[in-house]
Every structure is written in C-alpha cells, then in structure tokens.
Image (cartoon, rainbow, N blue to C red):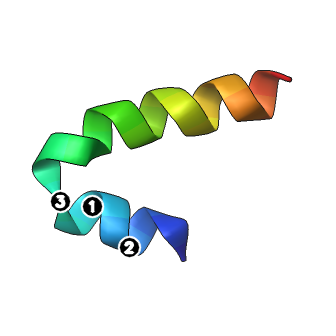
C-alpha cells in the first residue's frame, strides 16, 4: 500500500525507497 503513494510521487519515491530500504535492513 505504501508503494502506491511512493510510486504516485516521483520525487519522494527516492527518499521513500531509501527509508523503506533502511527500515527493512534494520
């Protein structure tokens, strides 16, 4: 579901992807 708004916004997509990636790593 979070991927929806992330994909909807090309700007925050990079930041969101990095945040989700870091959160997933933690």
Where residue 7 sits in the image (x, y, percent)? 27, 61
Secondary element at tag 3: loop
Answer yes or no: do the residues labelled 1 and 3 have beta carbons within 8 Å?
A: yes
Q: Residues within 10 Å of mark 3 (few under 14, many from 20)?
A: few
Q: Which mark is residue 4?
A: 2
Task: Give the quarter of the image for residue 5.
Answer: bottom left
Q: Is residue 3 left or right of residue 21?
A: left
26 up-or-down from 16: above or below: above
Q: Residue at x 13, y 49 (%)?
A: 10
Secondary element at tag 2: helix
17 up-or-down from 2: above or below: above
Q: Which mark is residue 7?
A: 1
> Which of labels 1 and 3 is toward the front?
3
Answer yes or no: do the residues labelled 2 and 3 have beta carbons within 8 Å?
A: no
Q: Residue at x 38, y 73 (%)?
A: 4
Q: Quadrant of the C terminus?
A: top right
Q: What is the distance, in whole Å, between disc 1 and disc 2 at their CAs?
A: 5 Å
Q: Quadrant of the N terminus?
A: bottom right
Q: What is the distance, in whole Å, between disc 1 and disc 3 at their CAs?
A: 5 Å
Q: Which residue is mark 3?
A: 9
């Amino acid at each position: 579901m979070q991927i929806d708004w992330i994909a909807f916004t090309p700007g925050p997509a990079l930041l969101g992807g990095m945040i989700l990636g870091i959160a997933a790593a933690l």
